[in-house]
Amino acid sequence: MRSVRGINYTTAVMTKLILVVGMVTGVILPFWNIPLMVRIWRRKSSQDVSLWWAFGVWVCFALMLPSAIISVDLAYQLFSYVNFVLFSTLIVVIIKFR
């Protein structure tokens, strides 16, 4: 009986850990847009960034956002919200320095 409870407890702890790691990384991952924004800002140029790529990625994130809003997956929601805001900011910086 103890081994069964131990397995269930271990599984529950691992599941919770996986969910927490997913949420934390879902928030952290979009912050990798910031170095690109800083580089563009310092150089005062976004000529090396393709507008097709930037707007293509942004449109995909915008189309995914409604799915994230209604999703029950908190990691997906957090990633989508933070990524949409930061990538939208990146788009503004790209346009500003074009």
Image: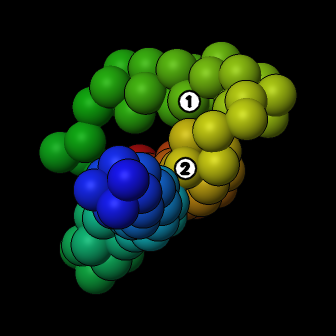
Asked if 81 appears above or below 32 in the picture, the reply is above
Instruction: Look at 44% across and 20% down and name the residue there.
Output: 56
Q: Position of residue 98 (x, y in %)?
A: 41, 49
Specify few, some or many for label 2: CA neighbours under 10 Å numbering under 14, 14-19, or 20 or more.
some
Q: Position of residue 35 (x, y in %)?
A: 27, 72
Residue under pointer 2: 75
Q: Position of residue 1 (x, y in %)?
A: 38, 53
* Dot label at residue 25: none
Front-lying residue, 67 or 55: 67
Instruction: Look at 73% across and 30% down and name the residue there.
Output: 71
Residue under pointer 1: 61
Q: Quadrant of residue 13?
A: bottom left
Front-lying residue, 80 or 15: 15
Mark nearer the viewer, 2 or 1: 2
Instruction: Look at 28% across and 56% down and name the residue there.
Output: 3
Q: CA distance from mark 2 to mark 1?
A: 15 Å
Q: Amino acid at mark 2?
A: Ala
Left or right: 6, with 64 as reference point: left
Q: Earlier in the sequence, mark 2 or mark 1?
A: 1
Q: Secondary structure at mark 1?
A: helix
Q: Amino acid at mark 1?
A: Phe
Residues at circles 2 and 1 in contact by the CB criterion of under 8 Å: no
Q: Position of residue 70 (x, y in %)?
A: 82, 28
Q: Secondary structure at mark 2?
A: helix
Q: Quadrant of residue 34?
A: bottom left
Asked if 27 appears above or below 39 in the picture, the reply is above
Instruction: Look at 64% across and 49% down and name the residue there.
Output: 74
Indicate how the structure is coloured in the image. rainbow
Asked if 27 appears above or below 4 in the picture, the reply is below
Front-lying residue, 77 or 11: 11
